[in-house]
Image: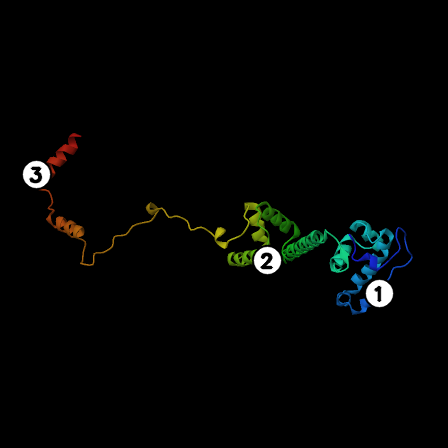
Amino acid sequence: MRIKNWNKFQHFKDRKPPWVKLYRDVLDDLEWYELDPLASKVLVMCWLIASEDDGNLPSTKNLAFRLRMTEKQTNDCLNKLSHWLERSDINAISEQYQSDSLETETETETKKRQKATVVATPDGVSQSVWDDFKTLRKAKKAPITQRAVDGIIVEANKAGWSLEQALTECVVRGWQSFKAEWVADKPKLVNRFDVATTTVPSKQGLDPALVKLNQDKLKVVPPSPEILAKLQALRVKT
């Protein structure tokens, strides 16, 4: 990497001059006016440093040290100075810088999202219960979100439970969520043999079976005296 058109800045050879030429035409250079203050300052310093090696500049790492800047700041400025520099690696450095910047921004956004999703311990829930519930959710790879907590609160209210009771039940039973129906009283099954059955009257009148019984009762007659005497004799013998 070197200064473009270095011979224009100096005619001394093989020495470290105390000064470099700065032409007045820089006043009419649009590229110069579009530089930010830091980049323009770095350009002048690069001219001075390049005078030590016939217009050549040191590596980015060494140049950053001479400029008392980080390598990232140095690369940022050098990418803005392509109008005054000759470097074969400008595209590679520019792409690497953009990639590093994008990666840094992505990491920053990821951290922000992670911080945003951290749910504080809800009111009325002890820290120990909350920590146990977080451990359970983590084991099940189910991040805790505010929406998930709000859903549990709704179901706990349906069941007439407090949020702490619902979370404790989740921890004990290994549930990552909570439903009121899971803790509702189950209806008992009734044995049909334990229930007394009743006869439903016929819509057409008396039950035919009852009618026949009544008719049979009318046909019954008392035993004759002879039969009664025989029955008495049998009782005496026995």
Work out whether residue 217 can be spotted.
Answer: yes
CA distance separating discs 3 and 2: 100 Å
From the image, which quarter does the C terminus lie in?
top left
Amino acid on which disc 1 is placed: Tyr
Amino acid on which disc 3 is placed: Glu
Query: Whole-percent x and y of residue 160?
Result: 53, 57
Residue at 81% of width from left, 67% of height from top?
Answer: 25
Nearer the observer, 88 or 130: 88
Check disc 2: other Cα within 10 Å, few if <14, some if 14-19, many if 20+: some
The tag earlier along the polypeptide, 2 or 1, is 1
From the image, state whether disc 1 or disc 3 is nearer to you. Answer: 1
Query: Furthest residue to the top?
Result: 237
Q: In the picture provided, is 65 more to the left or to the right than 149?
A: right
Residue wearing tag 3: 226
Query: Whole-percent x and y of residue 63?
Result: 81, 52
SS class of the residue under badge 1? Answer: loop
Query: Whole-percent x and y of residue 124?
Result: 63, 57
What colour scheme has been applied to the protein in the rendered image?
A: rainbow
CA distance separating discs 2 and 1: 64 Å
Check disc 1: other Cα within 10 Å, few if <14, some if 14-19, many if 20+: few
CA distance separating discs 1 and 3: 163 Å
SS class of the residue under badge 3? Answer: helix
Residue wearing tag 1: 23
Residue wearing tag 2: 146
Query: Furthest residue to the right?
Result: 18
Nearer the observer, 30 or 153: 30
Q: In the picture provided, is 41 more to the left or to the right than 140?
A: right
